[in-house]
Amino acid sequence: NGTRVRGQLQQTSLQHPDGHPPDIGTAFWSLRRVISETGLSRATVYRYTRRGEFPQRRQLGPGRVAWIANEVVAWMESRPKVVDDNNS
């Protein structure tokens, strides 16, 4: 995952240098940030939200929605780990 800044791909990380997750509290994340952090497409975010498989968005004002960051991070951490059967 990463974000583009002036044509360069910058890595984003949910980890502090000490290995602990940042204290993001109840920060709001835009759809762009949710897509960047999760690696999901816009369509998948909305599809999962409709199915109840992803945190609900919040109405911030007219025409403006966002997700609560710690809810999205909790969803990300709840994803099953990939088991590589080839290394068994």
Image (cartoon, rainbow, N blue to C red):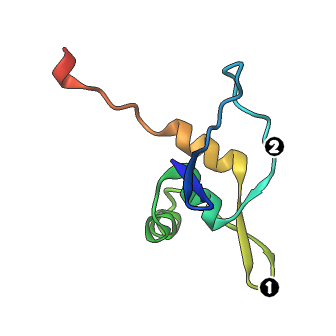
Q: Is residue 43 above or below residue 52?
A: below
Task: Name the residue carrying label 2.
Answer: 25
74 vs 40, left or right, is right
Q: Quadrant of residue 66?
A: bottom right
Identified at 70% across, 30% down, the residue is 21
Disc count in the image?
2
Res 76 → quadrant:
top right
Instruction: State the image coordinates of residue 65 (x, y, percent, origin top left).
Output: 72, 72
Callout 1: SS: loop
Earlier along the polypeptide chain: callout 2 or callout 1? 2
Residue at point 40% right, 31% down?
A: 81
Looking at the rendered structure, which numbered label has been put on residue 62? 1
- Name the secondary structure under disc 2: loop
Q: CA distance from mark 2 to mark 1?
A: 24 Å
Question: Tag on residue 36?
Answer: none
Taking the image as drawn, is residue 17 in sight?
A: yes
